[in-house]
Amino acid sequence: MTALTNPELAPALDEALGARVRWLDQGAFYQSDRPLCLVPEQLYQELAMLQPFQQQPVLSLTLEDPMRPDEGPVEVELTVVGAHSGDSADIYLPWGYAQQLMEEHFHAVSCDSIRFYVRDNRKIEELYERVKGWFQPVDIQGGDTLYSYALTIYDEQYRGTVSALQQNIRRSQYTIPVLLVLVVLAGALVSFLAVRSARRSYALMRVQGLGRRGLLATVMAELAIPAAGGCVLSAAVWRQIWPLVLFLGCYLLGGLAAAIRPVLERPAAILRQQE
Amino acid sequence: MAILTAEQVSFSYQGKHETVHAVKELSYAFDCGELYAVVGKSGSGKTTLLSLLAGLELPTQGQVLFQGESTAQMDCDKYRRNHAAVIYQSYNLFPQLTAEENVMYPLLLQKMGKQDASQRAREAISRVGLDSAHLRRYPSHLSGGEQQRVAIARALAIRCEVILADEPTGNLDEENTEKITDILLGIAHEQDRCVILVTHDLSIAARADRVLELRDGRLQNPEA
Ligand SMILES: Nc1ncnc2c1ncn2[C@@H]1O[C@H](COP(=O)(O)OP(=O)(O)OP(=O)(O)O)[C@@H](O)[C@H]1O
Ligand SMILES: [Mg+2]
């Protein structure tokens, strides 16, 4: 006997798939707590033949809970509302009724299988840990434990998603340093080009009497003040210090490399070249 | 006593493959209150001579003396900061500074206060015939003639004794050339400074007090 709770299972019992079901009304079968059932096609036919005057055949069953043999058997009568074809000999009843039946007669709800969905699959490990104690490992050999329950967690989708994410994380752990190096190199190049493009101005400063050390200080201040300002701002936002220090250092080095010529070379030579 | 003296000055550029003797055994004494024109064919050594007088290059032989002191012995940066200004044909100004700030720059190098420097800059700019509307303009918004006048104002502002100008009118039309020449002559005569001007323009040379002719690095008329 299988109890159904969920209208989403309807397609499995759909006429197109072989079930001939007389639905009470839309979805009512599943939530019903009336004694209803769906039976295999063959049984349906037999019942119909045995009860020619009934509009809906009735199935009489004797139930026993193997866990509580002393409770005694229970007689139930179920109204057959549909049939399903195929090889399975299952009898389906609405969950509401099945639950009521079990509580009434056996004071507990017991069932062969429960299928449920975990809403937050980040907690799948936690779920596994918690329910492990209640389930026994399945004995494939069919040992003498009468009731062994297996917990099967279908987590392929979860694992697929997680491993894709982990792969992405791993990949980004490689790409972030590469990007960082590229950014640092770009910074050095930018400052190199900036200083180089201002070579003429620097030579002009030298012509007007700015000494070598003074020029070096000017170049470095022009580079460092805005760059350091930017780094302080990004440090406040980013809270990562060493990449910024690295960036700032390389940025200044790039500028310094371009400053070598205007500082050391005679300004007249630079001005002549660009005339 | 002459303010600036060249004594047997020679200068050669040491290239990878060759040595170019740009100035050869040149001697001359420059005085304040005079405008000197240096003329000569292209490659005759005019710019090189100017660089030597400005302390931008040091003679390979001989010496350049400013008020009796050799440029080889002195702090040439300080010399240019306080005593000698150089004006080139083009790109004389810092493009990122306004006209006023360009003129203030060497004053600030002299450690003058901002207020005084600005005052001095305004005076100098009006002295070269630019009005206050030009003060806040950037070089790219000034004509070539106006830029050159700002460059002269910058030389005036530091009250240097020597002004060295390398073809300052090379890019200018006749009218502006005349204006610039007037200003330089005025500076030499009225403010008693030594102005040395390299030019190809013979009409400018004709207005100079003295004309030095260079040919192949040698002074042709040392008695000029
Ligand atoms: N850096 C240098 N390296 C080698 N030779 C140079 C260098 N600068 C100038 N020269 C050479 O020195 C000589 C004098 O050059 P200079 O620039 O002084 O001439 P100039 O009279 O100013 O010419 P122009 O009228 O074209 O400006 C030329 O033969 C020139 O080729
Ligand atoms: Mg020249």
Image (cartoon, coloured by chain):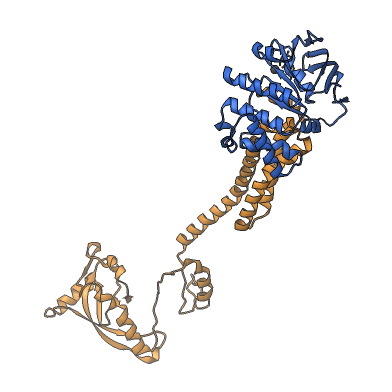
| Residue A119 location (% of width, % of height) | 43, 69
Q: Is residue A189 visible?
A: no
Picture residue at 88% right of the left edge, 28% below the top: B73
Q: Colour of chain A?
A: orange
Q: Quadrant of residue B197?
A: top right
Give the tally of numbered discs. Answer: 0
Q: From the top left corner, tell me how far across and down residue A87 is, in percent.
A: 29, 66
| In this picture, residue A262 sits left or right of residue A177 | right
Quadrant location of ligand 2?
top right
The image quadrant where one finds the C terminus of chain A is top right
- Residue at horizontal 64%, vertical 30%? B150
Asked if residue A157 is positioned above or below residue B67 in the image, the reply reads below
Query: Is there any visible trace of residue A207 in the rendered image?
Result: yes
Residue under the point 52% across and 75% down: A130
> Residue B56 is drawn in which quadrant?
top right
* A250 shown above or below A15: above
Eyeballing the image, is B224 above or below A240? above
Tell me residue B6's x, y (percent).
84, 18
Give the chain coloured blue.
B
Please indicate whether residue A242 sits to the left or right of residue B60 in the image: left
In-front residue for pair B95/A151? B95
Name the foreground residue: A231 vs A169.
A231
Q: Residue at x 66, y 36 (%)?
A: B123
Where is residue A272? Give x, y as percent.
69, 22
